[in-house]
Amino acid sequence: MIDKLTLPSDEVLADAQLIWAYHQMNHALRPADIGIGLGSHDLGVATFAADLFHQGLFPTLIFTGANSPSTTARFPRGEAIHHRDHAIELGVPASNILIEPRATNTGENITFTRDLLAGTDVKSVLLISKPYMQRRAFATCQKQWPDVEATCASDPIDLISYIATIGDPNLVLSMLVGDLERITTYPARGFAIKQEVPPDVLAAYERLTAAGYTNHLTT
């Protein structure tokens, strides 16, 4: 666990909590034709995806992802492969898992998975991601794969517990800020549908960027 003294100030955490809550879609879990585990530095995505598989929410699980600068050292064989192996360790049969090992961003996660499933009768997908990536994953899927019904899911963990799990408050808060920036800028670039951002969330974003949580901004 992270000692309280290593956490940011209460004011910073309050802003982070606003953004954390905004990022989550709060979709009700429901069965889907396919589960899609979006690769990242967080192996908890594979853990939760395995749990959802065992609950019977989908018959086939796809892990998608190559590497980003933050995952190359941890997952040298690529995010999708390491996530698949973890899910197999948790009891998901290898025969029920597909991998898409080339994607290097969320748009490619969606489009490459869509292309992998071309010719199949997929009408619904369950997007499994880090908690703070739900909204961007949904907006991307709505733009890049509008023919499917997309539901989002992630480990139902609170922000402080998630920071403790990752072990790096600065990384988590910078990721929160970076994802919000992408939500506001990617629609104009054709990557995702537009999402309304409440004024208090935008104000929290401005304060956190001013405080230096900028390592994962695109600009």
Image (spheres, grey):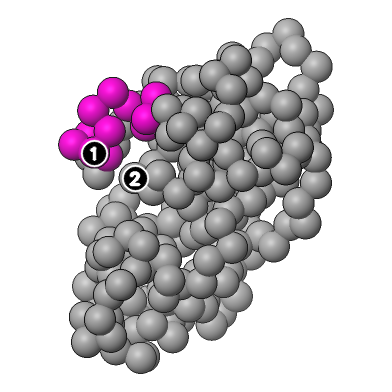
- Alpha carbon distance from label 2 to label 1: 8 Å
Residue under label 2: 41
Q: Taking the image as drawn, is residue 68 in sight?
A: yes
Badge 2: few (under 14), some or many (20 or more) residues near its Cα, within 10 Å?
Answer: some
- The residue lying at 34 percent from left, 45 percent from top is 41
| Residue 59 quadrant | top right
- Marks 2,1: beta carbons within 8 A: yes
Which quadrant does the N terminus fall into?
bottom left
- The residue lying at 50 percent from left, 28 percent from top is 88
Residue 69: x and y in percent read 23, 39
Main SS type for the magenta part?
A: loop
The verdict on residue 80 being magenta is yes
Does 102 appear above or below 132? above
The verdict on residue 91 being magenta is no
Q: Taking the image as drawn, is residue 110 in sight?
A: no
Residue 122: x and y in percent read 77, 22
SS state under label 2: loop
Badge 1: few (under 14), some or many (20 or more) residues near its Cα, within 10 Å?
Answer: few
Residue under label 1: 74
Q: Which region is colored magenta? A: 71-82
Does 122 appear above or below 5? above
SS state under label 1: loop
| For residue 213, side relative to residue 110 (left or right) | left
Q: As drawn, which residue projects farthest toward the bottom? A: 10
Foreground: 71 or 201? Answer: 71
- The residue lying at 22 percent from left, 87 percent from top is 5
| Residue 192 quadrant | top right
- The residue lying at 23 percent from left, 59 percent from top is 215
